[in-house]
Image: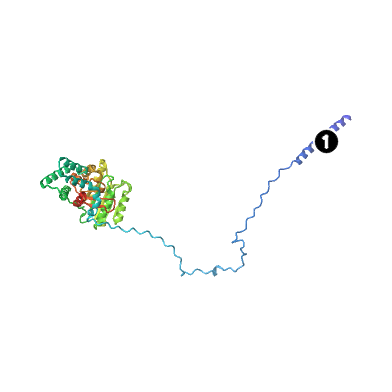
Amino acid sequence: MELVEIVILAVVIALVAVGLVGGLVVGSRKKKQLPPPPPSTPTITPPAEPQVGEEAETPRDEARRTIDEVGLPDAAAPVEEEAPVAEAPEAPALEVPEPTAGRLVRLRARLARSQNSLGKGLLTLLSRDNLDEDTWEEIEDTLLTADVGVAPTQELVERLRERVRVLGTRTPDELRTLLREELITLLGPDFDREVKTEGGAETPGVVMVVGVNGTGKTTTTGKLARVLVADGRSVVLGAADTFRAAAADQLQTWGERVGARTVRGPEGGDPASIAYDAVKEGIAEGADVVLIDTAGRLHTKTGLMDELGKVKRVVEKHGPLDEVLLVLDATTGQNGLVQARVFAEVVDITGIVLTKLDGTAKGGIVIAVQRELGVPVKLIGLGEGPDDLAPFEPGAFVDALIGD
């Protein structure tokens, strides 16, 4: 019995212990608090509808019209016109080129300023009391310095010596007259210096302008267009210089000033094709003259020179060329003769244009280049002005050379 009581007592003690442990666990769970909830996001109240102003009055109740009561606009009512479109600016008025007759005479003073050293030097030497060998050598040197050339210089000196000896010429007026006559003789007064632009019955006159880079070839072509327009001729320009940047633009600007149309192609295009099209357009328009500006060929480049010959052959499919003008820079002196010789072998030069003649005292190049090619100088450039290209007149040129 004691054993049974002991067992029961042990069971009771165990149950009590289990109960105490369970109570502690449950109590600890009850004491643990959950984390506080996140703060609630405040409710944003949307602003009231915007009003005309703070003092806007409350809309009044008004009778509203139905769609049938709303009248349509009167069809006869004038409709507001659109603003007029700005008109394109008018083309600038065409320029009236200066008449060509007597241009060289009018420009004589400008030519004389740069050429006087030659004429005055010769007259001073010829006026010496004793024309000995030393004096004649000085005369030769003066002529050679002016780029007259060796052969023409020797010929001129020999003729002067003979006439002075025979005539006994001594006065300044007599010497000037004597020198003037001999210089005009050297310039070839019998040369036909007219620029041929007549063409055929149904084809315009065709002029091709050639020359090396830097001689003023494109500018000369534009100025020649002015010369022809001043003489009453209609002109079409062919921009066959496709290798120099803006050459076609430059030529077109010259043409627009006097109403001459310019036929052009893409930069780097075929010059022969453009030249052909220019003549074709000239025929279609019934133009009097077609001027073709070619690229500035370096005379040392055989391939480019051959291409220049091609341009000439293509143009001649329409008819013969009336003129092939070689543009030379007067300041290049004897080097211009080398250029002239090579060009003459390729395209049969018919006339020479000497540019920048007002900027050099070497006017003797006129004599030398004519002797070299047997071709006349037909035009000379005497300045930067648009009308400073003048037909060459031997008498007026010599008068400017030696002064009054």
Percent across and percent down for residue 13 are: 84, 33
Q: Could you tell me if residue 355 is visible in this image?
A: no
**Residue 74 coordinates in the image, percent (x, y):** 48, 70
Q: Is 352 placed above or below 48 here?
A: above
16 relative position to 336: left or right: right
Residue 259 in which image quadrant: bottom left
Q: Which residue is mark 1?
A: 16
Image location of residue 78, percent across then percent down: 46, 68
Depth check, front residue: 380 or 397:
397
Q: Residue at x 30, y 51 (%)?
A: 251
Q: Residue furthest top?
A: 3
| Quarter occupied by residue 8 | top right
Tell me if 228 is positioned left or right of 92 in this view. Answer: left
**Label 1 amino acid?**
Val
Residue 158, by quadrant, is top left
Q: Nearer the viewer, residue 17 or 139?
A: 139
- Residue 6's spot in the image, x, y percent? 86, 30
391 and 290: which one is in front?
391
- Neighbourhood count class around disc 1 (C-alpha, 10 Å): few under 14, some 14–19, many 20 upward: few
Near-viewer residue (212 or 385): 385
Q: Secondary structure at mark 1?
A: helix
